[in-house]
Image (cartoon, rainbow, N blue to C red):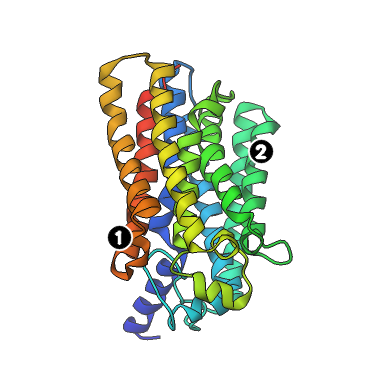
């Protein structure tokens, strides 16, 4: 193999792992660790780092399985519409990496995540922590893997909201401290709603390919007009729940209000542009809106890490 071929092979593997998109899980997990640190509890940095590694491995596993199982619809995006944020990487679909090789890496990474989980449970002497990891790993498997394939049944978006919106924050705190955070049901909603919108809007450019192969995600089931309205409502609720969290943890403290305002204004802007102005109909604006949805999700995670104080 020549140097050029080796470089191309490395590039393909880096591409298919979709490392930039792992931030939507790593950032809220890190926010959970930070909240645990701010809570005053003693934390385990070893468990925290292992937890971040496990989350990274589980994310990549999920993406690799998606590349293997979504080949047909991913190739159809070449006919309809492609964005940097949807339609897969086409590395597996195009034959640059075989499904078998991608599947082998997915198994290795999942085993690595399991070993991290076992050691974290040993550090804190808590098998409940391992149960959280098992739930996350199982969700990563069945999201795209037949016969369950949640992404095909209108359930994938809700599992994404739970796993990336609540589970990451909750588990980040628990991994760091060995205890479960209070009020997680209060501070998780804006993160869950924002990641729900990320996956929902990423399905807009994939609407025709998904509909063609019979992939019944929420956008296919509802249609883009109705899905855009749901997106708008969810984005509006991101703003509302962020303000409620600010008030719950820092009643009328204007400093923390200013910290919350970027999320509030950004989410309201997306609610208007997608839900009311229907900018998703303008092809040139679809990819920027996809990217802005991811940016909002990351901003929510950072904001929660700042304003949630125990």
Give the Cα distance between marks 1 and 2: 38 Å
Q: Quadrant of residue 175?
A: top right
Label 2, residues with CA under 10 Å away: few <14, some 14-19, many ≥20 = many
Residue 297 point in image, percent of width and height: 39, 44
Q: Is residue 34 above or below residue 223?
A: above
Q: Quadrant of residue 84?
A: bottom left
Specify whether 245 is left or right of 136. left
Q: Is residue 21 above or below residue 117?
A: below
- What residue sits 32% from the left and 81% below the top? 3
Residue 182 point in image, percent of width and height: 56, 20
Q: Which residue is mark 2?
A: 130
Closer-to-camera residue (299/155): 155
Decide which of tag 1 and tag 2 comes sooner along the chain.
2
Specify whether 147 is left or right of 31. right
- What residue sits 64% from the left and 51% below the top? 139
Q: Is residue 49 visible?
A: no
Q: Check disc 1 and report its element: helix, strand or loop.
A: helix
For this orientation, the residue located farthest to the right is: 147
Q: Which residue is mark 1?
A: 288
């Amino acid at each position: 193999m020549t140097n050029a071929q080796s470089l191309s092979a490395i590039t393909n593997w880096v591409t298919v792992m979709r490392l930039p998109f792992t931030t939507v899980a790593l950032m809220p997990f890190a926010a959970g660790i930070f909240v645990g640190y701010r809570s005053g509890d003693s934390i385990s940095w070893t468990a925290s780092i292992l937890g971040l590694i496990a989350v990274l491995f589980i994310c990549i596993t999920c993406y690799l399985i998606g590349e293997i199982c979504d080949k047909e619809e991913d190739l159809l995006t070449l006919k309809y519409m492609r964005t940097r944020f949807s339609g897969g990487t086409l590395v597996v679909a195009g034959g640059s990496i075989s499904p078998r090789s991608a599947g082998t890496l997915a198994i290795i990474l999942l085993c690595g995540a399991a070993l991290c989980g076992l050691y974290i449970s040993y550090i804190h002497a808590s098998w409940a922590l391992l149960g959280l990891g098992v739930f996350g790993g199982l969700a990563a498997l069945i999201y795209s893997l037949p016969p369950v394939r949640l992404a095909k049944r209108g359930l994938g978006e809700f599992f994404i909201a739970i796993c990336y919106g609540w589970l990451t924050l909750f588990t980040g705190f628990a991994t760091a401290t060995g205890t479960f955070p209070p009020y997680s049901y209060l501070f998780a909603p804006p993160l869950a709603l924002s990641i729900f919108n990320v996956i929902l809007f990423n399905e807009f450019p994939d609407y025709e390919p998904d509909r063609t192969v019979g992939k019944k995600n929420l956008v296919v089931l509802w249609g883009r007009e109705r899905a855009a309205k749901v997106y708008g409502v969810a984005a509006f609720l991101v703003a509302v729940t962020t303000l409620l969290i600010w008030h719950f943890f820092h009643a009328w403290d204007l400093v923390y209000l200013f910290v919350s305002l970027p999320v509030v204004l950004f989410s309201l802007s997306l609610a208007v542009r997608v839900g009311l102005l229907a900018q998703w109909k303008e092809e040139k604006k679809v990819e920027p809106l996809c990217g802005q949805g991811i940016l909002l999700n990351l901003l929510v995670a950072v904001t929660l890490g700042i304003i949630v104080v125990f």
